Amino acid sequence: MPTLNNKNILVIDNDIDLLKVLREILTSEGYSVDTAESGRQAVERSKTSVYDLALIDIMLSDTEGIELLDILREDMPNTIKIMMTGHPTVNNAIEALNRGADAFITKPIDPEGLLELVKDKLKKREQAENLCQDKVSEWLEDRMRRLELVT
């Protein structure tokens, strides 16, 4: 099945059953999905693949999801990062957002809500990238016109 605009998603959770469900939900919509059962595995994947979006559980077997968020923010600065938790607290949400998470969702995960969030975040990032490209193109065109006037 072709991927949705080649969007790659990394799902990180130590719950293998949840990884399978999330993979199925996301691939059914055309996304390419990799999974990681630990923070270590996620870091390894981030070194060998480029991801448009990462779903990160707050509680992993080998590290805190917030710590992993910090690492992935460095390794994958352009990747959208969405934190997931089955034990939501206001402090968790605030800390995750303050440390660079783009969104915070709670388990059990609503499939339709997840797909809507993923689509929305990817669309907004694409719009921002297009705006940046448009600005660069405008600047280059302006510079070229000025150079033509000088010569």
Image (tube, rainbow, N blue to C red):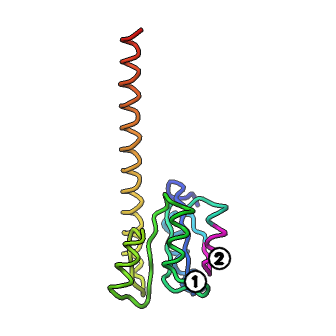
Q: Which residue is pictured at 51% across the width and 86% down the height?
A: 59
Quadrant (top left/top right/bottom left/bottom right) for the C terminus: top left
The residue carrying mark 1 is: 63
Quadrant (top left/top right/bottom left/bottom right) for the N terminus: bottom right
The image position of residue 98, as x and y in percent, is: 37, 72
The residue carrying mark 2 is: 40
Q: Amino acid at mark 2?
A: Arg
Q: Which residue is pictured at 52% across the width and 77% down the height?
A: 67
Q: Which residue is pictured at 53% across the width and 66% down the height?
A: 9
Q: Are marks 2 and 1 in contact (CB under 8 Å)?
A: yes
Instruction: Please tell me which of labels 2 and 1 falls first in the chain.
Output: 2
Residue range of the region highlighted in magenta in the rendering: 35-45
Label count reads 2
Q: Amino acid at mark 1?
A: Thr
Q: Is residue 57 magenta?
A: no
Q: Does dot 2 land on a helix, a strand or a loop?
A: helix
The image position of residue 2, as x and y in percent, is: 57, 57
28 or 34: nearer the viewer: 34
